[in-house]
């Protein structure tokens, strides 16, 4: 399939047929949009590395429970977002999407799963996350409850309910908290029992990188979102304003890492890679100004943004582990 065919791209129903357990599990798994799971997996890894650096110990059971809860919240949020966008008509009108990155999973529109089935899947995933959170609550104490409640509320209110944060232009803020600050500080606290100002600052670059993923993914959806009163930031700002905001997010992330390297606990060399990552970030910002008029360039910009988040998060994790093993 060429990029010229992208407006009609989506999952092929014949790839997900089958009434057996294997077919069902394949549908359920891919409905969660697993390509984006690194956005929730990596913050937990980075936060755990910081917690290990601070405490000098590692609790594998707590780590696995936190990872399960976070991935289930992420998957549930993705599924419920598809339900909300289908109900609002956004995904049905989205002919500019760049599949599989924007426009949702397309499972409802392709007839692979019904809206009701997707809603039940989303609720089930949040229930699993709540059970994992309850076990963590029993192990680590009541603060787990507040982390969990905040994460689930952000996942639900992002797409559903009277607020629909994404429609209010608050989607990036919700994602920055739900897939940046919360999982990084929460995972670190589970290992060390402490939330320091330096830890919160450590979570900010990851928050900016993950918010940038959402921001650029919304660019191809501007027409469909605007037509259905989904007032995302790209709808409000236009291509030029969105490009400026996107570049500012990456500059902010690099500046915070520089602060952590020069004045904070991380090695001075930590600032080098985020500075280099500004090169693909600025190239992606340039693509945002053009938007879907250059689909190939827009697709590469989205993929670059995903790469920046992955490489940057792993880099910060490695920096924390370097301190834990060689500078402690």
Image (tube, rainbow, N blue to C red):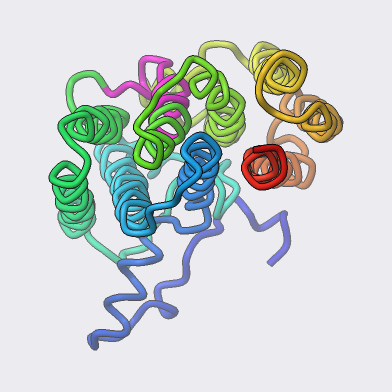
Please name the residue shown 71% across and 38% down the image: 327
Q: Is residue 106 above or below residue 320?
A: below
Q: Is residue 144 left or right of residue 185?
A: left
Measuring 29% from the left and 49% from the top, which residue is drawn there? 69
Side of 140 relative to 294 (left or right): left
Does the magenta-highlighted stretch encompass residue 183? no
The answer to whether 124 appears left or right of 280 in the picture is: left
Percent x, y of residue 225? 44, 28
Instruction: Estimate the x, y position of residue 156 in percent, counting from the top left.
Output: 24, 34
Residue drawn 21% across the image and 52% down it: 132
Q: Is residue 174 magenta?
A: yes
To which quarter of the image does residue 322 belong?
top right
In the rendered view, tell whether residue 221 sits above or below residue 21. above
Task: Say whether residue 95 is visible.
Answer: no
Instruction: State whether residue 35 appears in this view.
Output: yes
Q: Which residue corresponds to the image point at 63% horizontal and 54% vertical from the top-left?
A: 6
Please state, as top left, top right, bottom left or bottom right, where the N terminus lies in the image.
Answer: bottom right
Query: Is 149 placed above or below 297 here?
Result: above
Query: In terms of depth relative to the viewer, which is nearer, 75 or 80?
Result: 75
Q: Position of residue 65 (x, y in %)?
A: 30, 54
Write down the region rendered in magenta.
Answer: 164-179
Query: 287 or 88: which is nearer to us?
Result: 287
Q: Which sits in the foreground, 56 or 172? A: 56
Name the magenta segment's main secondary structure.
helix
* Quadrant for the C terminus in the image: top right
Between 21 and 179, the one lying in front of the other is: 179
Q: Is residue 9 above or below residue 221?
A: below
| Residue closest to the far front | 328
The answer to whether 172 appears left or right of 271 in the picture is left
Which percent across, then down, holds residue 232? Answer: 46, 20
């Amino acid at each position: 399939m060429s990029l010229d065919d992208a407006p009609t791209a989506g999952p092929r129903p014949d790839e997900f047929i089958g009434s057996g357990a294997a077919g069902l599990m394949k549908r359920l798994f891919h409905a969660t949009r697993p390509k984006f799971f690194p956005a929730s997996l990596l913050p937990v890894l980075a936060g755990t590395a910081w917690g290990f650096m601070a405490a000098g110990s590692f609790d594998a059971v707590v780590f696995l429970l936190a990872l399960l809860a976070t991935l289930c919240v992420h998957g549930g949020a993705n599924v419920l977002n598809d339900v909300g966008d289908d109900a609002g008509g956004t995904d049905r009108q989205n002919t500019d999407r760049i599949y599989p990155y924007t426009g949702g999973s397309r499972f409802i529109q392709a007839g692979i799963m019904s809206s009701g089935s997707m809603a039940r899947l989303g609720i089930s995933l949040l229930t699993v996350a709540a059970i994992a959170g309850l076990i963590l609550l029993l192990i680590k104490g009541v603060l787990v409850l507040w982390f969990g409640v905040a994460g689930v509320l952000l996942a639900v209110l992002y797409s559903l309910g009277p607020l629909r944060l994404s429609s209010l232009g608050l989607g990036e803020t919700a994602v920055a908290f739900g897939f940046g600050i919360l999982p990084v500080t929460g995972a670190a606290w589970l290992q060390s029992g402490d939330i320091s100002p330096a830890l919160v600052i450590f979570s900010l670059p990851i928050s900016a990188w993950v918010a940038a993923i959402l921001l650029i993914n919304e660019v191809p959806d501007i027409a469909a979102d605007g037509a259905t009163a989904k007032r995302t930031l790209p709808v409000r700002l236009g291509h030029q304003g969105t490009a400026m905001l996107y570049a500012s997010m990456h500059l902010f992330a690099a500046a915070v890492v520089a602060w952590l390297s020069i004045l904070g606990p991380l090695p001075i060399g930590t600032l080098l890679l985020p500075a280099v990552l500004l090169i693909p970030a600025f190239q992606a910002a340039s693509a945002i100004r053009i938007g879907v008029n250059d689909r190939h360039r827009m697709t590469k910009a989205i993929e670059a943004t995903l790469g920046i988040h992955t490489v940057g998060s792993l880099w910060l994790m490695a920096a924390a582990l370097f301190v834990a093993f060689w500078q402690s």
